[in-house]
Image: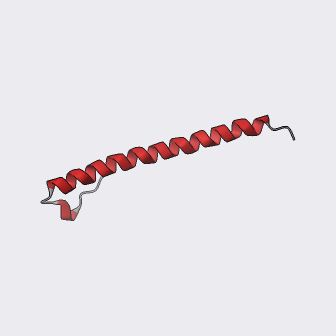
Amino acid sequence: MVQKCASCEGEPKLAAMNKKFGMIHGLLSLANIMAFGSLAMHSRYFAGKINL
């Protein structure tokens, strides 16, 4: 959820930059979570192939 910035009231350009930053930040956070999940699945797959 994006919160309004008190100093952005009269600055539409700053508000637009904050909105774009929030969107990019959210997408990158999602990409990081997906990468971590992929790493976990990949690690589990290779751990199953180890013969001890």
Q: How is the image coloured?
A: secondary structure
22 with respect to 9 (left or right): right
Task: Give how far across and how far down residue 2 sits, in percent.
Answer: 30, 52
Q: Residue at x 17, y 53 (%)?
A: 13
For residue 49, above or below residue 27: above
Which residue in the rendered view is the most extreme toward the right?
A: 52
25 with respect to 9 (left or right): right
For residue 7, above or below residue 47: below
**Quadrant of the snapshot with the C terminus:** top right
Task: Give how far across and how far down residue 12 sits, in percent.
Answer: 15, 54
Q: Residue at x 38, y 50 (%)?
A: 25
Task: Give how far across and how far down residue 34 sits, in percent.
Answer: 52, 41
Q: Residue at x 28, y 48 (%)?
A: 20
Task: Give how far across and how far down residue 36 sits, in percent.
Answer: 57, 45
Q: Nearer the viewer, residue 10 or 46?
A: 46
Q: Is residue 41 visible?
A: yes
15 with respect to 47 (left or right): left
Q: Residue at x 32, y 51 (%)?
A: 22
Q: Nearer the viewer, residue 9 or 50?
A: 50
Quadrant in which residue 18 is drawn: bottom left
Quadrant in which residue 50 is drawn: top right
Count of labels in the image: 0
Which residue in the rendered view is the most extreme toward the bottom?
A: 7
Q: Is residue 1 visible?
A: no
